Structures are given as structure tokens and as C-alpha cells.
Amino acid sequence: MAQSQNSSVYYTEHATSFHGMATYGNVMLGNKAFEFYNERNPEDYIQIPWDEIDRVAASVMFGGKKIARFAIFVHGSESGFSFSTRDNKATLRAMREHVPEEKLLRSLSFFDVIKRGVLSLFRKNR
């Protein structure tokens, strides 16, 4: 059985982890870490201490009305852990207690990525 890093938990939500194949479980926010536990296999878990989080990027859709998923990036890693909860907006609001607001970012949309790629083709190398 996995040992929780938190001594107290203040937010719990059903969630999906997109690390590899989609895994269903629960997200728990506590005083020391962000934790995800698989509902079928408790040994399949992700624990991220609050001081290891570099930034959190949210995928915002429909003019800022809906958050589809969010990714947590840790120090020293380019790839992140992607999650989606039943209420992503409430989850991110609860994370603001431990993650500063300047580290909560909006990820680029599909069209922003395409636009940057096309513009980079026409820029001169300096």
C-alpha cells in the first residue's frame, strides 16, 4: 500500500491521469503534496511535493470558459504530468494555496502553436 506524503488532505476529486495510458483514480491535495492514486491499483500512484512543482499549465477552451486538462511540470523536467478532474477550475483554485499565481499558466492553443511554427519559418536566423 502506498504511503501518503500528506498529514492532512483538504481537497479530493475524481480524476484521470494521462501519463501513458489514461488511468482513473483520485486527486488529493494536502499540506505537503499533490497526489494521484489509481482506483484499481493503489500501488500505481503519482506524488508531487509542492516545492518540486515548477509550473502548472492549463488547457483553456471556449474563450476562457472551460479548462479541459492541466499539466504539472516539475523542476528539471521538460515533460509534465497531465490530469483532468471533474472540476478542473476548482482543483486549480485549490492548488493556488501552494502554487503561486505566476506559476499557473495558460497553455498555447492549437492555433497558437501552428501560428508560431509558420512564423518561425519566415524569420531570419541571426
Image: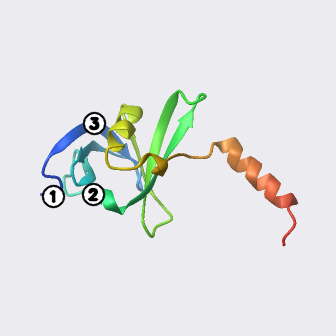
Mark 1 sits on what residue?
2
Q: Is residue 10 above or below residue 44?
A: above
Q: Position of residue 100 (x, y in %)?
A: 40, 49
> Is the Cβ of the residue at disc 3 closer than 8 Å to that at disc 2?
no
The three-letter amino acid code for the residue at tag 2 is Gln
Q: CA distance from mark 2 to mark 1?
A: 10 Å
Tag 3 secondary structure: strand
Q: Residue at coordinates 80% horizontally, 53% vertically from top-left?
A: 118
Indicate the quadrant containing the C terminus: top left, top right, bottom left or bottom right.
bottom right
Mark 3 sits on what residue?
13
Q: CA distance from mark 1 to mark 3?
A: 18 Å
Q: Is residue 21 above or below residue 90?
A: below
* Mark 1 or 3, closer to the camera: 3
Tell me where residue 48 sits by quadrant: bottom left
The three-letter amino acid code for the residue at tag 3 is Glu
Front in this rendered view, residue 46 or 38: 46
Mark 3 Cα-neighbour bin, 10 Å: few <14, some 14–19, many ≥20: some
